[in-house]
Image: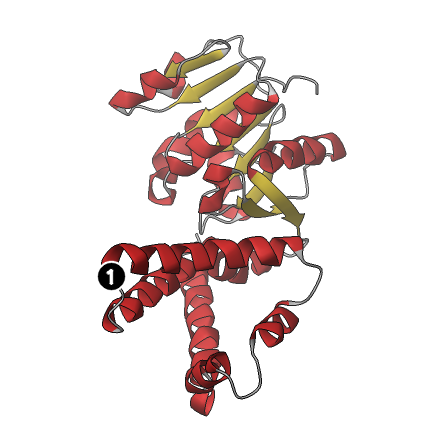
Amino acid sequence: MSALPALLLVGCGKMGGALLSGWRERGISTAIVVDPAPGAAELAAPGIKITASAQEIPPDFTPAAVILAVKPQAAPQVLPAYGRFAGQAVFISIMAGKTIQSIGQMLGADAAIIRAMPNTPAAVRQGITVAVAGSLVTESQHALADTLLAATGGVAWVTEESLLDPVTAISGGGPAYVFLLTELLEKAALEQGIPPDLARLLARQTIIGSGALLAGSTDDAANLRIAVTSPGGTTEQALAVLRADDAWPKSISAAIDAATKRSQELQG
């Protein structure tokens, strides 16, 4: 596997850190990380330089890609300093709610921009990222972005930027919904008298094992559910409660709709 080209990572929080870790595994030749946090200096490694601001980037540094991983609310203050790389590098934004148009207004008219929505399983290389490319992105820049984003899991591309709103609701927030289900399973186990340690083990391993089964199967999720549900059995009884008056299906749809609308409200 060939080494990655020179990269500039702006912001190294949880998601930026997950990306950096994935790139290190794939071979970084040169990278600069801009992050003013006191602990950021610990990220330094062979080929990786840490700086506190854009002003500290060497003038002769020419990255192939600039990855924007700062908090969306900080974008207006942070991004303009990187406009000098427009026309040279591809900008890959993982900032929620910031559209390609709004990012371009901060970076300049020549900026080639890709907007991406990863999710937190990226930390264990099991993430899924959905991305959309702006009109100025070249084929080689698109391919580079695909390589960089794939370092933390799967990558899917769409042509309509508006789809990133429901994507944010489904996969961006999805891990939280799974964790909530795990919490509720543990709570229900405790209510049935199962000891705390066993309740936690059962809830967590059931979610983990079900995910692994889903990953290893070519069957639809509906078919896997049916396979677990014996007619007249205990699982069928539980599902009857969850689906009474279409309660669980309706609440899931309503939750995704609410998250999608909130993503649309946050655009700018």
Q: Is residue 217 depicted above or below 71 in this figure?
A: below
State whether residue 90 is above or below residue 185: above
Q: Is residue 193 left or right of residue 41?
A: left
Closer-to-camera residue (77/159)? 159
Q: Residues within 10 Å of mark 1 (few under 14, many from 20)?
A: few
Residue 113 appears anywhere in the view: yes
Q: Residue at x 47, y 53 (%)?
A: 208
| Image spot of residue 245 (x, y percent) | 44, 91
Q: Position of residue 229 (x, y in %)?
A: 56, 78
Q: At 63% from the left edge and 23% from the top edge, which residue is drawn?
A: 88
Residue that mark 1 sits on: 195
The picture places residue 149, in percent across and down from the top left corner, at 59, 37
The residue drawn where x is 56% and y is 53% is: 212
In what element is the residue under mark 1? Answer: loop
x, y percent for residue 113: 59, 38
Amino acid at dot 1? Pro
> Image height check: is 268 above or below 178?
above
The quarter in which the N terminus is drawn is top right
Left-right relation of 185 to 239: left
